[in-house]
Amino acid sequence: MEPITKRVGQAPNFEDLEKAEEYQRQVCAEWGELNDETWMHLTLHSLRRHGDGGFTCHHDPAIGETLRAHGPMRDIMSCSGGGASNARH
């Protein structure tokens, strides 16, 4: 989750799908060898159109701000008050 936490809300705007796919391939390279069709599928489902015809990532940038403000994901996931480890028997 750390790489996602760092980049959510930080992506640039893209003037076309090709530039968006290039970015997707770069930031998600750890996903391994994917074929061109799969990369384009992931890209298309990660974008929304701007009014000017360009594209931006399809998520609320505030998600990234919140994740970064709360530190590493392992700290968020281990907060008291939630999760199975805090369930009462």
Image (cartoon, rainbow, N blue to C red):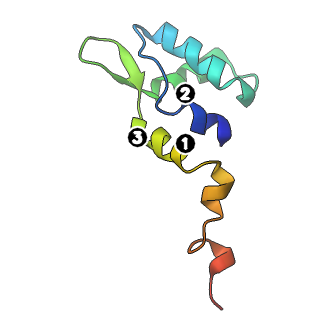
The location of residue 48, given as percent across then percent down, is 36, 25
Measuring 65% from the left and 57% from the top, which residue is drawn there?
A: 75
> Which dot, 3 or 1, sits closer to the camera?
1
Q: Relative to the observer, which residue lies in front, 10 or 47?
A: 10
Q: Which residue is mark 1?
A: 68
Q: Is residue 69 above or below residue 83?
A: above
Labelled disc at residue 29: none
x%, y% of residue 78? 66, 64
Residue ID for mark 2: 42
Q: Earlier in the sequence, mark 3 or mark 1?
A: 3
Residue 65 location (% of width, % of height) = 46, 40
Relative vertical location of residue 55 with respect to residue 61 in this rendering, above or below: above
Circle 1 SS class: helix
Q: Of circles 1 and 2, which is in front?
A: 1
Q: Quadrant of residue 30?
A: top right
CA separation in Å, label 1 and label 2: 24 Å
The residue located at (56%, 75%) in the rendering is: 81
Q: Nearer the viewer, mark 2 or mark 3?
A: 3
Q: Amino acid at mark 2?
A: Leu
Q: How many marks?
A: 3
Residue at figure coordinates x 42%, y 8% from the top left: 16
Q: Which residue in the protein does label 3 denote?
A: 62
Q: Amino acid at mark 3?
A: Ala
Q: Earlier in the sequence, mark 2 or mark 3?
A: 2
The residue sitting at the left extreme is 51
Residue 43 relative to residue 16: left or right: right
Mark 1 or mark 2, earlier in chain? 2
Q: Would you place residue 10 above or below residue 5 in this image?
A: above
Cα separation, mark 3 vs mark 1, equals 10 Å
Residue drawn where x is 58% and y is 12% of the image: 22
